[in-house]
Amino acid sequence: MIKKNSFYDFAIRRFKRNKLAVIGGFITLFFVVVAIFAPIIAPHEPSEFFFIEGQNVYNKYASPSSDHLLGTDSLGRDVFSRLVYGARVTMMVALLAVSISTLIGTFIGLITGYFGKIIDAVFMRIVDIVISFPVLFLLISISTIMDPSIWIVILAIGFVSWTSTARLVRAEVLRVKELDYILASHAVGSKNMKIILKHILPNILAPIMVQITIGTAQAILMEASLSFLGVGIQQPTPSWGNMLMDAQKLLVLRDMPWIWIPPGIVNLLLVLAIYFVGDGLRDAFDSRQ
């Protein structure tokens, strides 16, 4: 006898066999733990200024030492502590932004795919208009018009990155709504909202989960790009993006690698890890497998 949840059992087994996906999952979990326990892991406050002993001068661009594992930045702040706290800020921005974009995209995808006709035509033209603008240009414009802050960055990323989810969900709804059990629900008089929420949505969660992982990685890159350009997370709040701003200086880029290499590496690692997880989920939930 085949269990009701056998598809998900097989999907989990397929995911576990994907070594890159499993490694990516452990790396992502590691950064989540770092973000949660940042106050315990970081040896100093991220905005604490350090001065040269006996002088009222910032101990800026100090080389790595036992006191400062990754040296200090242009204002004498501990780079390692800012890196640890930056994980919390960067991941919070990414997760909240992806939550917003997923809710908007899923809602629009469900109603356009299910009802079709004029609703589908109107919303899909809106999607086409949003997609026609470069995402980074839209984000920079929004962050420039409004005072840059962590919440503006979250809302900006969330409200410009929902289109991919909307098109994906719409395509899945168009496929699922023609299946026999959906037609049977119509035949027995089930209401549209009940069909959408109880029968269609649970059966398209797998591609949505994959899209969430991809969107999270993209949101991290968007936040880093905005903060690097000075229109994202503002000082003194640490994020991996604004930690890279010092790399714009040739002196830092050439002679002080401890300033920009660590945030660059952790950004790269986390984004790659999330993409590996996304690829693993996509392959695991592919019913054709």
Image (cartoon, rainbow, N blue to C red):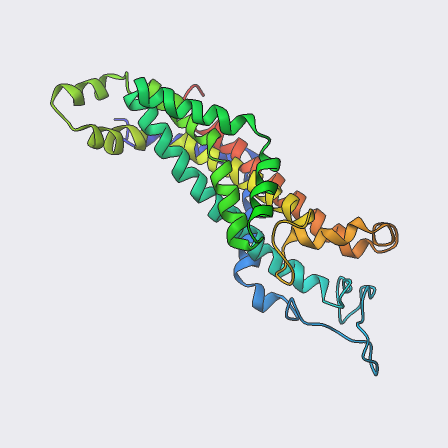
Residue drawn at 83 percent across, 50 percent down: 253
- On the rendered structure, is 147 left or right of 225? left
Q: Can residue 286 be seen?
A: no
Residue drawn at 65 percent across, 68 percent down: 47
- Name which quarter of the figure residue 122 lies in: top left
| Residue 288 position within the rendered picture, expressed as x and y whole percent measured from the top left | 43, 19
42 and 289: which is toward the camera: 42
Instruction: Determine whether 73 is above or below 161 in the image.
Output: below
Query: Residue pushed farthest left?
Result: 188
- Name which quarter of the figure residue 142 lies in: top right
- In this rendering, the count of numbered labels is 0
Instruction: Determine whether 171 is above or below 143 in the image.
Output: above
| Residue 234 position within the rendered picture, expressed as x and y whole percent measured from the top left | 63, 57
| Image quarter in which the N terminus is found | top left
Residue drawn at 43 percent across, 43 percent down: 100
- On the rendered structure, is 169 left or right of 278? left
39 and 59: which is toward the camera: 59
| Residue 31 position within the rendered picture, expressed as x and y whole percent measured from the top left | 58, 52
| Image quarter in which the C terminus is found | top left
Query: Residue pushed farthest bottom?
Result: 54
- Name which quarter of the figure residue 81 lies in: bottom right
Instruction: Determine whether 74 is above or below 261 in the image.
Output: below
Instruction: Determine whether 273 is above or below 118 in the image.
Output: below
Q: Can residue 126 be seen?
A: yes
Residue drawn at 28 percent across, 16 percent down: 178
